[in-house]
Image (tube, helix red, strand yellow):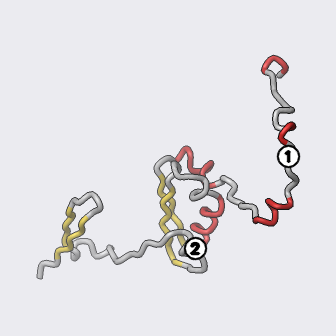
Amino acid sequence: MNKQLSIRLDSGRDVRFNIREHAHLDCGYAVTSHSSQGQTAERVLIHVDTEKSELLVNNRFAYVSVSRAQHDAQIYTNDGSKLSHSLSRESSQRTAVEVEQQPAVPKDSLNKYVLIPEML
């Protein structure tokens, strides 16, 4: 029996192949980093788009994504030269209480310090 598998990609392109010739393929599931919290998987594949905002790609995203893997984590990215910087961006967010407790900055002090290039 000829067991053909057909896959339609997001681009609309159809890909077909014989599953007996590719027995190593299996079903897979994709989840977001946020929804994977509290879960563990044997292997984790992580897509990191370094062009995304630091609100999405940061040190918290890196920790949660990689720590889901029990045995193996592989990272795929659009730009390897920016990967380290993107995954090391600080993601701590202040609580409303912390913002409220921060002393207000007087408006007249905002222009108090000006760096003049000749003085450097």
Which numbered circle lies on residue 68? 2
Q: Residue at x 48, y 60 (%)?
A: 47
Between label 1 and label 2, give the one nearer the viewer: 1
Q: Residue furthest top?
A: 118
Residues at marks 1 and 2 touching, judged by CB atoms closer than 8 Å: no
Q: Residue furthest front?
A: 107
Residue type, mark 2 in image: Arg
Q: Is residue 32 left or right of residue 16?
A: right
Q: Residue at x 66, y 53 (%)?
A: 89
Q: Residue at x 16, y 78 (%)?
A: 3
Residue type, mark 1 in image: Val
Frontmost residue, 8 versus 98? 98
Q: Position of residue 28 (x, y in %)?
A: 39, 75
Which numbered circle lies on residue 38? none
Q: Is residue 12 left or right of residue 69?
A: left
Q: Is residue 74 above or below residue 103?
A: below
Frontmost residue, 80 versus 49? 49
Label 2 packing within 10 angstroms: few (<14), some (14-19), many (20+)? many
Q: Position of residue 83 (x, y in %)?
A: 56, 50
Which numbered circle lies on residue 105? 1
